[in-house]
Image (cartoon, rainbow, N blue to C red):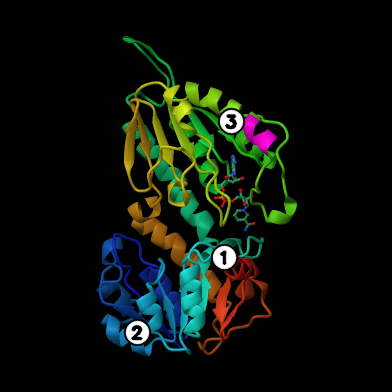
Amino acid sequence: MILGLLKEQGAEQRVALLPEIVSKLVQAKVEVCIETGAGTKAFQKDEAYRNAGATIAERDELLKKADLFVQISEPSIELIQSLSEKQVWLSQFNPLWNTDLVKSFLTNGITSFSMDSIPRTTRAQAMDVLSSMATVAGYKAVLQAANELPNFFPMFMTAAGTIRPATVLILGAGVAGLQSIAIARKLGAQVEAFDVRSAVKEEVNSLGAKFVEVEGAIDDSAAGGYAVEQTEEFKKKQQEAINDHAAKADVIICTAQIPGRKAPLLIPTEAVERMRPGSVIIDLAASSGGNCELTKNSETVIYDEVKIIGQSDYPSLMPIDASKMFGKNVFNFLQLLIAEDGSLNLNFEDDIVKGTCITHSGEIYNERVKSVVES
Ligand code: NAD
């Protein structure tokens, strides 16, 4: 089969496969063809891809000849319409939100896989791009917060007096939140964290942070490790606790999300009004509505001398390592799709292949996406 690596459009700086992964695919008898300049923004030259065994082509030629396309971001509807039924699409296109794209794949008879739909099972862990990108985001968010804050993160005892350490509140202790806790602790801040899943309390404590306790959360083990919608009574208690802790925090990193739904609102305007001037909020949930009422996606808002940064594309700002992780996850997944002779083998008996497949032969394969699109 011919695998086509496409160049990302717009501001995205990552590339889905680094040359080191291309070389592994070539060894697995896959013919790899790269769109001219696909890796440029991630500091990967065409020459490096050529040395790894790939050929280079212009976009129009590549779109005609590849059997399977790989890129990071979602395709445009026009691009989907230009594909033929035998071609397969693989990227991260958030099908629970982008139902128009799902419908377009369906009506055009394209087989599509979305890397953000990889089931969260132990076997699929090495393919989990959401975890990889959340790791990058959690790290970068803390570095930006440290840069923006008009105070030190660590405690300093100097001849000019003692500087108190910054207090960082992390909302949501999933993959991004735990990474943020670890980095904020390494920079010497005092860290508190809150999550509706009380199961993460031990992990939070083991990273040296304090878990903010709110009793009465619903934990649903059937939700695959994800959070579920909470009762109104719990939300009220949670809000009071968060408001009190937010008022004392210098930095808040928001990471709380519920897959396929709007992000929970955890920092209302009143909570921001109680924060100290100069404090910083980084909202990683900005693209799904934000955890802070004042967040604007991809913008920085200053309200009452508090800076609210609605940044959700940190992985693109660290393109080499983010591409390295994304590509390794894709490679691990592709191993389920590539036969010994390098041809494409779609085995829907495999739960990971079936769960990640969004559309095939005019049908929606992923059950959650199916229920959202058909509702
Ligand atoms: P996510 O990005 O969907 O959410 C981030 C965090 O926000 C979660 O911890 C969630 O509980 C929390 N949250 C949601 N609503 C909240 C609210 N109202 N208040 C406070 N916090 C709230 O999740 P994620 O980080 O991608 O993953 C969540 C968990 O899934 C992980 O911690 C892990 O346990 C599990 N997981 C499993 C695998 C695997 O087995 N392959 C891989 C990755 C993650």
| Magenta span | 232-236
Check if residue 250 falls in the magenta segment: no
Disc 1 marks a residue whose amino acid type is: Ser
Residue 374 percent across, percent down from the top left: 61, 71
Label 3 residue SS = helix
Quadrant placement of the C terminus: bottom right
Is residue 285 toward the left or the right of residue 148 in the image? right
* Vertical comparison of 269 with 263: above or below: above
Give neighbour class at mark 2: few <14, some 14-19, many 20+ (Cα, 10 Å): many
Residue 19 percent across, percent down from the top left: 36, 71
Looking at the image, is mark 3 or mark 2 nearer the viewer? 3
Give the alpha-carbon distance from disc 2 to disc 1, as whole Å: 24 Å
Q: How many marks?
A: 3
Q: Using the rendered view, name the quadrant where residue 44 is placed.
A: bottom left
* Vertical comparison of 338 with 157: above or below: below
Front-most of 342 and 246?
246
Residue highlighted by disc 2: 63
Q: Residue at x 57, y 63 (%)?
A: 126
Disc 3 marks a residue whose amino acid type is: Gln
Q: Residue at x 49, y 83 (%)?
A: 107
Residue highlighted by disc 3: 239
Q: Using the rendered view, name the quadrant where residue 77 is placed.
A: bottom left
| Predominant SS along the magenta part | helix
**Res. 117 mark:** 1
Residue 110 seen in the current view: no
Give the alpha-carbon distance from disc 3 to disc 1, as whole Å: 31 Å
Give the alpha-carbon distance from disc 3 to disc 2, as whole Å: 50 Å
Front-most of 20 and 150?
150
Is residue 55 toward the left or the right of residue 23 in the image? left
